Amino acid sequence: MTESKNIAEFYNNYLNRLIRDFLKPNIRTENAISLSLKKIPKDVRSILDLGFGLGWSSFEIARHFTRADIKGFDISKELTKTANALFPADNLSYQSMDLTRNFPNGKFDAIILLDVFEHIPASKRDLFYRNIKHALTDNGRVIFTCPTVYHQKYLRDNKPEGLQPVDEDIDIEVILDFATKTETNLAHFEYLDIWNSRDYLFAVIERPYKYHTESVNQFIKTVDLLDFYSKYTLLKKSNLSNEIIPTLSHKQRLKHTLRSLLD
């Protein structure tokens, strides 16, 4: 079995964990989605979400940017099937693709990489950079989150089971190289404190900025992510097996029933 097939198989078997994280909630994922939504310009028309996992990030983007066409791609056929069943939207499509070998056609105003860039092998970055460069519109931007080198070292030393088949170190030097090779500039960089100090980073690279004197109100200010009971309702409405949908506690069932009656 080739390396790509091994990686695809790993993510095909990742579904149960992703569903548990979806309901928990996972503060890392929630932060990544919320921060990214606030860095997507309001007037975008095309958005590419790479490595969508369960599909929640793509769905939230589609909910908040209803006039944009959202395309999601992931290496796992199983996760792509699940995303189509769980998170359908009129302006959203999901497809399976190995992004280290191929790349979606078209031009995009925003390309989203939420905890994905570190899973691109360093040896395949140059091809990935070329594809990103050609896929960005003249005003396009890449928005991404990654674990920091501090967190990766902690996992290697203390919790190696938390690492995925490919988990590269991403630091500011790698990000600047990403920007250089995609003909973009670093527009935003910050460390995040998710579970520990500086364990994640959030960055935006964009095509060279064109100064203007128009309104600066170009980003959404409030984000309204799905809450626990909305998530659970989506899971129950999908064709997913009940065996992989977590069981609610008695109190949660009562609240869910009440919510259903009020909606």
Image (cartoon, rainbow, N blue to C red):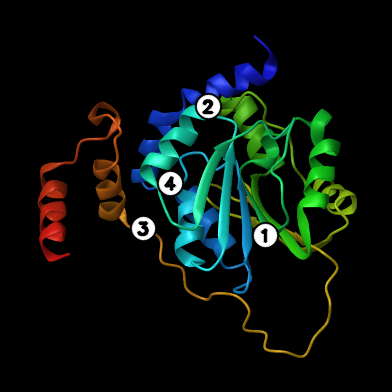
Q: Is residue 143 left or right of residue 237?
A: right
Q: Residue at x 37, y 37 (%)?
A: 19
The residue identified by callout 4 is 26
Say if 68 sits above or below 246 in the image.
below
Mark nearer the viewer, 4 or 1: 1
Inspect the image, locate mark 4, and give the three-letter code of the amino acid beneath it.
Asn
Using a 10 Å C-alpha cutoff, classify the residue at mark 4 as few (fewer than 14 neighbours), some (14 to 19) or many (20 or more): few
Say if 259 sits above or below 121 in the image.
below
Inspect the image, locate mark 3, and give the three-letter code of the amino acid beneath it.
Leu
Please tell me in which quadrant of the rendered image residue 126 appears: top right
Inspect the image, locate mark 1, and give the three-letter code of the amino acid beneath it.
Ala
Query: Disc number at residue 226?
Result: 3
The residue identified by callout 1 is 110
| Residue 138 x, y percent position in the rendering | 81, 65
Q: Is residue 78 left or right of residue 211?
A: left
Distance from the alpha carbon under mark 1 to that under mark 2: 25 Å
The residue identified by callout 2 is 11
Using a 10 Å C-alpha cutoff, classify the residue at mark 3 as few (fewer than 14 neighbours), some (14 to 19) or many (20 or more): some
Query: Disc number at residue 78?
Result: none
